[in-house]
Image: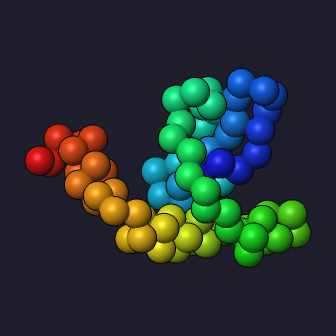
Amino acid sequence: MVLYEVDADFVFVADGDLRKLAKPKKKRRKHLASTSREEPGLLSLYELGRLKDSDLRQALQKNISTIPDAASKEDSLFGQE
């Protein structure tokens, strides 16, 4: 999940599991797949400084279950298929 943008080319991402909020990963935009989903609840928590890793994990789990074929793509990334 993208936390914030650094500049036109880079953003910081975190997933709350492998990549925690305390140490987000800097990624190039062109290496990310965009979705039309936004999480206004997470945005308000982030702006208040109350966003937790567990909030990110819950939001991502909810979104992954609604994306068709996302589970099989995730498994194939780690060589489990």
Residue appearing at x 67%, y 63% in the figure: 38
**Is residue 4 visible in this depiction of the protein?**
yes
Where, by quadrant of the figure, is residue 23 drawn? top right
Side (left or right) of 38 relative to 71: right
| Outermost right residue | 48
The answer to whether residue 44 is above or below residue 5 is: below
Residue 70: percent from the left, percent from the top?
Answer: 33, 57
Residue appearing at x 56%, y 52% in the figure: 35
Closest to the observer: 31 or 19? 31
Residue 30: percent from the left, percent from the top?
Answer: 58, 27
**Is residue 61 visible in this depiction of the protein?**
no
| Outermost left residue | 81
Residue appearing at x 76%, y 45% in the figure: 4
What scheme was used to colour the molecule? rainbow
Where, by quadrant of the figure, is residue 53 drawn? bottom right
Residue 37: percent from the left, percent from the top?
Answer: 61, 62
The answer to whether residue 35 is above or below residue 31 is: below
Closest to the observer: 35 or 64? 35
Residue appearing at x 23%, y 55% in the figure: 72
Side (left or right) of 42 relative to 34: right
Side (left or right) of 18 relative to 74: right
Give the total of numbered labels: 0
Closest to the observer: 55 or 31? 31
Where, by quadrant of the figure, is residue 66 drawn? bottom left
Residue 29: percent from the left, percent from the top?
Answer: 63, 31
